[in-house]
Each structure stands twice: as structure tokens, then as C-alpha cells.
Image: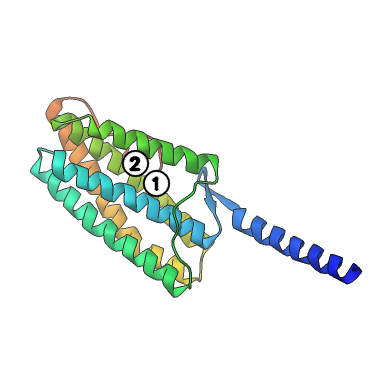
Amino acid sequence: MRHVANALLLVGMLWAAQGQARDKTMDFRGMKFSTDPKQFVERMLYLHGEIIDEGKLAQRSSQSQQVKELSETLVKTHQSFDDRLKTHLKEQKLQAGTFKPKTDEERSTVAFEKSTETKLKTLSGEAFDQAFLAAQVSDHDRLLLTVLAGQQMFSGQPLAAVLAEMQPELLKLRERSYQLLGEQAASLGTGGAGTGTGGEDGKK
């Protein structure tokens, strides 16, 4: 019986250690990121999915040809990123699940994305375009920080290489969104478009 008890205790300790490893986070420029590769990729897939949904909404709701063209590029590019991340998981013998936020920052991100989607659905015309473009600047700032954090956490691993491939295109999309937002603001006389360099500001 003592051997059985010791074996059960050892199994419990191993499960606890694995749970702690899965729940471990890293701070990166004021944001917390899970160091568990599967959780990290699921977070990335969630963010890509939100941008894809917003892009599809813009294709239906925007009256600007430039915004529509951007939204088409957003959907196409982020869908390719989504597919690449899922392929990576399969290569690592993992399967993507539904993203479940585990930190306050992740829960805040999910709540904010839902709020943004709800807001966009109530807008039309130039008001929609401005809100949509501001959302893309913020979303891509967040994604760029996530990519940078991932490259640091998973340096030397296949996931870091996948993230490095995404970074240049994410920056281009962020800058194009910022450019169009500035043009919209200038045409309406509403002032500047915010920060012109990549960086998470937590606002849309």
C-alpha cells in the first residue's frame, strides 16, 4: 500500500508541475503572454479571427473603395496566417482548440474585441470607416507585440520562425490602416490619427 500511495503522490506532483508549466506567463512590454505554445497559438488564432471578421464586416458596410480594398487584403492575409499557424500545430502533433483567456489581460482583450465588433455593427459611412481603421491600427499593434513576444519566448523553435514570417506583413497592414485613418481624419477635419509607430496602446 505504501508503494501505491507513493506512486499516486508522484503522479499528483507530476500533474501539478505540468499544470504550472502550462499556466506560466512572461511579461513583455506591459503584457502577459502564456509560455505554453498551444495556448499562445490559440491566442494568435483568436486575434487573426477577429480581424478576419472585422474585414468581412467592412466589405459589407464600408462606402470607401480604399477601405474595401484594405479589408479584402486583411481577410486574405490573416486567413493565410491562420492556416499557417494551424499547420504548425499539426506539425507539432497538437490540435487547436477554442481560445480560453486565462489572464486578466487576455480577458480584457476578449471583452474589448466584442465591444468593438458590437460598435462597428451600429455604424455606417465615414463613422464606420474611422472606427474600423482605428480598430485595425490597434489590433495590429497588439499582434505585432504578440509576435515579438513569441519570437523571444520560443527562440530557436519552429514557432519563432513562423512568427518572424508574419511580422513584415503585419507591419505593412498596420501602416496602411494608419495611413487611411489619417486621410479620413484630415478630410473630416478631425485631427490626427494617433501614434504613427507600432505599439500597443490598448485603444481602438
Rendering coords of residue 86 (x, y %)? 38, 65
Viewer-proximal residue among 39 and 173: 39
Kind of residue sitting beneath label 2:
Ser
At mark 2, the secondary structure is helix
* Label 1: which secondary element: helix
For residue 168, which quarter of the picture?
bottom left
Which amino acid type corresponds to the residue marked 1 in the rendered image?
A: Arg
Observer able to see residue 79: yes
The colour scheme applied to this rendered structure is rainbow
> Does residue 165 appear to the left or right of 186 in the view shown?
right
* Pointers 2 and 1 in contact (C-beta within 8 Å): yes
- Decide if residue 197 is on the left or right side of residue 35: left
Q: Image check: 27 left or right of 96?
A: right
Q: Which residue is mark 2?
A: 138
Q: Point out the residue furthest to the front here.
A: 1
Instruction: Name the residue tied to disc 1.
Output: 142
Which residue is at 22% across, 27% downward? Answer: 191
In terms of image quadrants, where is residue 44? bottom left
The x and y percentages for residue 149 are 48, 55
Q: Which mark is residue 54?
A: none
**Does residue 204 show up?**
no
Q: Residue 167, percent across and down?
A: 35, 59
Is 25 above or below relative to 18? above
The local crowd at label 1, few if under 14, some if 14 to 19, many if 20 or more residues have their Cα within 10 Å, is many
| Whether residue 88 is situated above or below residue 81 in the rendered picture | below
Image quarter where the C terminus lies is top left
